[in-house]
Image (cartoon, helix red, strand yellow):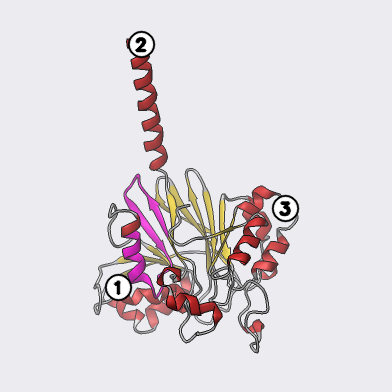
C-alpha cells in the first residue's frame, strides 16, 4: 500500500513538473488581427461593418502580437498600433497581471499607421515613458528620428531606438531570438520588415504586410515549411472587395491566392498558416461561411486573444 502511495505521489509530482516546464515555454499572444483601420472601420456603414458597430463583441484590434517568456518574466510587443492603449490592458487581463504593463521592447515592421502610430501614447502627453526599446530597420529608425512628433519621443528619451539589420538575428534571452528580414511593400517612408521569432521549442513567422508573394525573393511555401506557425498577410479575401477602386494601388496577396499557392502541399504545411491582418471588407471577419471554407481547406485563422 505504501509503495503504491509513493508511486502515485511520484506520478503526480512528475506530472506537475512537466506542466510547470511546459508552462515556462515562450509563446505568442495574439492581441489584434485587423488591418490598420481596425474593425469596424471608420466611416463604414456597409454590411461588413454594420454588425460590428452594433455588437461590441465583434470588434477587433489592429494586428499586434505579444511574445511572452514566462521563464524570464519578460515580454515584447510586435507592432505599436493605434489600439495600443486597449491592447496593453488586454494583455494584462489575459495574463492576469503577471507581467509589467509596458513591454521590454517593441518591434515595428514599417511606417504605415496601423503599425507604428501607437508610439505616440508613450510620449509626454500620455505615459511619458523612459527609454522603451523600439526595434526598427534603418530607414524606419531615420524616419522616427527626423520627423515630428516621433522625433520628440527620441529626444525626450521616451523611446530608445534599436537598429535592426536585414537578415540579422537579435538575441533577446537565452532561449529567444528574432530574425529580421525585408519584404516588398509600398515603402513610402520606410522599408518593411518581417520577423521570424525563434524560441527553444518553436519558430514563428510574422509577415502582416507584403505586396505579393511572387515579388519576394524567397518562396513563401519553403519559408512556411521551416516554421511551426506562419502568421501571414490576409488583408483581402479576393480581388473583388473594393469595387470601383484599383486594387493595384493596395497590393496584397489575397487569401484565395495564398491558398492557391499551398493547394498541393500536405495538410501539415497548410495547418502551419494562420491568416492575419484582415481588412474590414474581408468576409473572414464577419461571414462564418467563409471562415469555415478556409478552415475546411486545412488552414487556420488567427483569433484575437489566442495563445499560440
Contact between marks 3 and 1 (CB within 8 A): the answer is no
Q: Tell me the element at label 2.
A: helix
Residue found at x 31% / y 70%: 159
**Residue 168 or residue 271, whichever sits in front:** 271
Comparing labels 3 and 2, the label whose residue is closer to the camera: 2
Q: Is residue 17 magenta?
A: no
**Residue 169 or residue 1, whichever sits in front:** 1
Q: Residue 244 in the image: x percent, y percent?
A: 65, 89
| Quarter the N terminus occupies | top left
Mark 2: few/some/many CA within 10 Å (<14, 14-19, 20+): few
Among numbered discs 1 and 2, the one appearing first in the sequence: 2
Residue found at x 72% / y 62%: 261
Q: Relative to residue 28, is residue 86 drawn left or right?
A: left
Mark 1: few/some/many CA within 10 Å (<14, 14-19, 20+): many
Residue found at x 62% / y 52%: 271
Q: Tell me the element at label 3.
A: loop
Res. 207 image quadrant: bottom right
Q: CA distance from mark 3 to mark 1?
A: 44 Å
Comparing labels 3 and 1, the label whose residue is closer to the camera: 3
Residue denoted by label 1: 122
User: Which region shows up in magenta?
Assistant: 66-92
Query: Does the rendering let one see residue 141?
Result: no
Q: Which mark is residue 137?
A: none
Q: Which mark is residue 265?
A: 3
Q: CA distance from mark 3 to mark 2?
A: 52 Å
Query: Does the rendering let one see residue 88?
Result: yes
Residue denoted by label 2: 3
Amino acid at each position: 500500500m505504501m509503495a503504491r502511495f509513493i508511486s502515485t505521489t511520484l506520478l503526480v509530482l512528475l506530472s506537475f513538473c512537466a506542466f510547470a516546464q511546459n508552462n515556462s515555454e515562450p509563446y505568442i499572444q495574439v492581441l489584434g488581427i485587423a488591418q490598420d483601420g481596425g474593425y469596424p472601420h471608420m466611416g463604414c456603414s456597409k454590411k461588413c461593418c454594420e454588425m460590428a458597430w452594433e455588437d461590441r463583441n465583434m470588434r477587433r484590434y489592429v494586428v499586434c502580437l505579444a511574445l511572452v517568456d514566462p521563464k524570464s518574466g519578460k515580454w515584447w510587443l510586435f507592432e505599436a498600433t493605434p489600439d495600443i492603449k486597449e491592447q496593453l490592458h488586454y494583455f494584462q487581463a489575459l495574463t492576469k497581471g503577471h507581467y509589467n504593463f509596458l513591454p521590454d521592447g517593441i518591434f515595428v515592421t514599417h511606417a504605415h499607421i496601423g503599425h507604428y502610430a501607437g508610439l505616440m501614447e508613450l510620449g509626454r502627453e500620455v505615459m511619458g515613458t523612459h527609454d522603451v526599446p523600439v526595434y526598427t530597420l534603418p530607414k524606419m529608425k531615420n524616419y522616427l528620428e527626423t520627423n515630428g512628433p516621433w522625433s520628440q519621443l527620441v529626444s525626450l528619451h521616451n523611446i530608445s531606438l534599436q537598429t535592426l539589420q536585414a537578415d540579422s538575428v537579435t538575441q533577446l534571452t537565452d532561449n529567444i531570438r528574432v530574425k529580421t528580414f525585408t519584404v516588398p511593400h509600398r515603402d513610402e517612408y520606410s522599408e518593411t520588415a518581417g520577423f521570424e521569432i525563434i524560441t527553444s521549442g518553436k519558430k514563428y513567422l510574422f509577415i502582416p504586410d507584403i505586396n505579393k508573394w511572387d515579388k519576394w525573393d524567397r518562396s513563401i511555401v519553403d519559408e512556411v515549411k521551416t516554421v511551426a506557425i506562419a502568421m501571414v498577410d490576409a488583408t483581402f479575401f479576393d480581388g473583388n472587395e473594393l469595387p470601383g477602386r484599383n486594387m493595384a494601388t493596395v497590393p496584397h496577396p489575397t487569401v484565395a491566392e495564398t491558398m492557391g499557392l499551398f493547394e498541393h502541399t500536405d495538410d501539415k504545411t497548410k495547418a502551419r498558416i494562420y491568416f492575419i491582418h484582415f481588412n474590414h471588407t474581408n468576409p473572414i471577419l464577419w461571414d462564418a461561411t467563409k471562415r469555415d471554407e478556409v478552415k475546411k481547406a486545412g488552414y487556420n485563422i488567427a483569433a484575437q486573444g489566442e495563445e499560440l
